[in-house]
Amino acid sequence: MPDLKTRITACRLCTDRFAATKTAHQPRPIVWFAKGARILIAGQAPGARVQASGVPFDDPSGDRLRDWMGLSRADFYDQNRVAILPIAFCFPGYNAQGADLPPPPICAKTWHASVMAEFGQPDLMLLVGGYAHKWHLQAKTNVTDTTKGWRDHAPWLFPLPHPSWRNTGWLKANPWFHTDLLPDLRQTVQHAMQAKDT
């Protein structure tokens, strides 16, 4: 049987779903994880730029996320240290109004249990965006309240807002995110990255 990453890469469950979107694109699962990585980033779904490049967070959102974590591109893309597991492996597309569609739940339902079983328990898990909060924490609160409760899960798990430019206003309205959460996050990230070297 092909290995898990190969099977996910070959997945075409959403072919008809994506063909019906405004973008009418084909599935392209973006798979980025290796067994034994210390940090697991649980995201939402690739965007259009990532769909084109095949590299997760290869966009301004990724630049902001790397800044939050205090990581260089080289460290961020070291699959032996950092794994990326989105709710959906493919770009979901846009609706008729040009807005982002949500990640199809069928992707996580099909693949997540297998990935987590192969991956094991990471030293650190980042939940990036509201869809990740709901899936992994069964969060009933909004992104602001879930993120404000980060101390309830630290030091091994941090709920974060999505690093999209659309959240720039949110970041300005919530200065505690930069003054309180990010220093603790960066310290925890560095500890996890160094643990891989020992």
Image (cartoon, grey):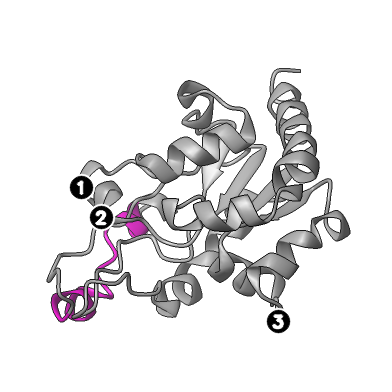
Specify the principal SS of the magenta part. Answer: helix
Could you tell which of marks 3 and 2 lies nearer the N-terminus? 2
Instruction: Tell me what residue is drawn at x 46 percent, y 26 percent.
Output: 73
The quarter holding residue 117 reads bottom right
Q: Give amino acid for label 3.
A: Lys
Instruction: Tell me what residue is drawn at x 29 percent, y 65 percent.
Output: 11
Residue 160: where, in percent of width, then height? 64, 55
Q: Give amino acid for label 1.
A: Ala
Residue matched to label 2: 48
Between 151 and 168, the one lying in front of the other is 168
Q: Quadrant of the N terminus?
A: bottom left
Q: Classify 2 as above or below 141.
A: above
Q: Does the magenta stretch include residue 185?
A: no
Q: Circle 3 — which element?
A: loop
Instruction: Tell me what residue is drawn at x 30 percent, y 69 percent.
Output: 92
Q: Classify 33 as above or below 90.
A: above
Which residues are the magenta region?
6-20
The quarter holding residue 39 reads top right
Q: Does the magenta stretch include residue 15?
A: yes
The quarter holding residue 184 reads top right
Q: Circle 2 — which element?
A: helix
Are the residues flagged by discs 1 and 3 in contact, CB closer than 8 Å? no
Are the residues flagged by discs 1 and 2 in contact, CB closer than 8 Å? yes
- The nearer-to-camera label among 1 and 3 is 3
User: Please, which residue is most extreme toward the right here?
Assistant: 152
| Distance between mark 1 and mark 2 Cα atoms | 6 Å
